[in-house]
Image (spheres, grey):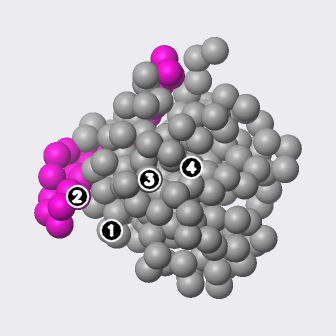
Amino acid sequence: MKKNIAILATNGFEESELASPKAYLEEQGWNADIVSLKSGTIKSWKDGNWSKEYNVDVVLDQANEVDYDALVIPGGVINPDLLRREEAAVNFVRSFFESKKPVAAICHGPQILVDADVLQGRKVTSFFSIKNDLKNAGAQWEDSEVVVDNGLVTSRNPNDLPAFNKKMVEEIKEGIHERQRV
């Protein structure tokens, strides 16, 4: 069954953390839209420098959770910090939890989950430097390659992408997670 997946990103996303999941989702025969704050392109970050630009498929103010089966949030230090400043981005993320749909976030990506107020009592992982932020938001943080908690998939860094991609697809195939919550 064909699925539509939203990948929420803006300038400064870690290139591999968008490119690898997007390619893996498309290998399943699914559609993976890059949703961003503005139209045009967004610029990736790779090895401490700006890298390739990626086309935005849907502008956030025209995106609606009902059009998607799941949400993916890549990391990078800049990307989640810019996204969490935008109420529309935070609300978009929260809407996936309210609809009990799978959400996958890697590296620094889970930072926006703090602002969406969806981490209370949830098991997660992330890049180590934001673990206290996640714990302070009520999450149970662990240092694992990939952590799955009722439709929420998190991983630490680009080295975890193979496990992240596999679990992300597994959770999306399962569909609605009744125990997914805000």
User: What's the CA distance linking mark 2 and mark 1?
Assistant: 9 Å
Amino acid found under the numbered disc labelled 4: Ala
User: What's the CA distance linking mark 3 and mark 1?
Assistant: 20 Å
Residue topped by disc 3? 160
Q: Is residue 87 above or below residue 33?
A: below
Residue topped by disc 4? 104
Mark 3 neighbour density, 10 Å: few (under 14) some (14–19) many (20 or more):
some
Q: Is residue 104 above or below residue 88?
A: above
Residue topped by disc 2? 45
Give me the disc on residue 20: none
Amino acid found under the numbered disc labelled 1: Ile
Q: Main secondary structure of the magenta part?
A: strand
Q: Tell whether label 1 touches label 3 (CB within 8 Å).
A: no
Whichever of callouts 1 and 4 sits on the residue coming sooner in the sequence is: 1
Q: Where are the magenta residues, as a range? A: 28-53
Q: Is residue 23 visible?
A: yes
Residue topped by disc 1? 78
Whichever of callouts 4 and 3 sits on the residue coming sooner in the sequence is: 4
Q: Position of residue 71 (x, y in %)?
A: 56, 44
Amino acid found under the numbered disc labelled 2: Trp
**150 or 68, which lies in front?**
150
Mark 2 neighbour density, 10 Å: few (under 14) some (14–19) many (20 or more):
many
User: What's the CA distance linking mark 3 and mark 2?
Assistant: 18 Å
Q: Tell whether label 2 touches label 4 (CB within 8 Å).
A: no
Amino acid found under the numbered disc labelled 3: Asp
- Which secondary structure lies at badge 1? helix
**112 or 148, which lies in front?**
148
Residue at the image position 67 percent from the left and 28 percent from the top? 173
Q: Position of residue 75 (x, y in %)?
A: 40, 60
Quarter of the view holding residue 1: top right
- Which secondary structure lies at badge 2? strand
Q: Tell whether label 1 touches label 2 (CB within 8 Å).
A: yes
